[in-house]
Amino acid sequence: MAAHRKSKQSPLGASAVRTAATLALASAATATLFEGSGHADPRPTTAQVKAKVDRLYEEAEVATERYNGAKEKADEARAAFDRLRDEAARRTERLNTARDALGAMAAAQYRSGGLDPAVQLALTSDPDQYLERAALAEKAGDRQAAALTAVRHELAAIRQLRGESADKLTALRGQEAELRRQKATVVGKLAEARNLLARLTTEERARYEAAAAARDGSGSGSGSGSDASTRADGPSGAGTAGGPSTVRADRSSGGEREPVTAPDGRAAAAISFARAQLGKPYVWGATGPSAYDCSGLTQAAWRAAGVSLPRTTYTQINAGRRVSRSQLAPGDLVFFYSGISHVGLYIGGGQMIHAPRPGAPVRIAPIDEMPFAGATRIG
């Protein structure tokens, strides 16, 4: 009887089952579609690209200053190592000379037979001649002792120099490794920024450039027309070394000009040099004369005024007397960002000359375009 029972029928008909299966597949496909859409990266806006590129440029500048610091230390370590190596070479030459002198003395003693003085006195027929020779022998002994002392001294000095050279070489290799690390960081940040900008359309790139130009004070780099400019009065354009010089600066808001007095001739000379660099490209790690990074420009400007500044932003800020923003005078160094990663040369009227970033040449810009971190007066 059980074998003849009919199987239990599904409460849904075949058509309904097919419909349900179709709906399930459709739901799964829709879910997959939306899931995929949810994970797709949305195209960044121009403002988002600009914000990220600006951040990358700032990080690259921080790495650039670290690179500059590592390069300065590596150069110092290399110079110290070279000095030690040269001194070791000179000491080795003196050691060889002293050894040659000892060898000559030993050969002379060997040829004379090296007889005991009492035996020589017994064999000689002329006591006066013997005593004369004995005095000469004593002098020769003194020379031999001095030569031995010289050899010992040079050997000790060479051993010390070799130890110091090994230490300097270790330091040099460490600085060169740090140099490579910072260079890789800079190159990586700049490459990432370039890749982001390459994704922009022509129209988006134009909007980005306009926004970047407004931030960097672009258009003032030529120093003509309504652009901000400075000039030092006097025959040489650098002011008079014996007293203050007048520097004129345009306001960024228009063509109105107001006189600004530099505190001395050196400040005016630094500004004059910086102004002559307007339009030259920013290149990280560069100190001129054809390109600069920010601290390379300020270092070169003050070098032209006869003042030696350290290489990096975070050492330049300690190279003079700190002044407040309200006390700024032309020639002061102005620093930006919490990490002191950017510097410009103040020229008065709220303006500075600086090397902004890759793609933005040396130009005049307002100091309020970046977060102000401090200022230093040189001299």
Image: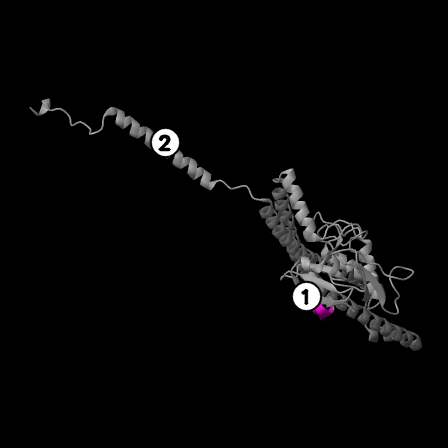
Instruction: Determine whether 361 is above or below 1 in the image.
Output: below
SS assignment at label 1: strand
Mark 1 surroundings: few (<14), some (14-19) or many (≥20) residues within 10 A: some
**Secondary structure under the numbered disc 2 in the rendered image:** helix
Chain-order first, disc 2 or disc 1: 2
**Residue hosting label 2:** 26
Disc 2 residue type (three-letter):
Ala
On the image, the x and y values in percent for residue 100 come to 82, 61
Locate residue 5 relative to residue 171 in the image: left or right: left
Question: On the image, which quarter does residue 178 sit in?
Answer: bottom right
Q: Position of residue 43 (x, y in %)?
A: 55, 41
CA–CA distance in space, label 2 to label 1: 64 Å
Q: Residue 359 vs residue 146: left or right? A: left
Depth check, front residue: 349 or 115: 349
- The magenta stretch is 321-327
Residue 109 seen: no
Q: Give the residue number, with chain letter if any, for mark 1.
A: 374
For badge 1, the amino acid type reads Gly
The C terminus: image quadrant? bottom right
The image's mark for residue 30 is none
Q: Quadrant of residue 235?
A: bottom right
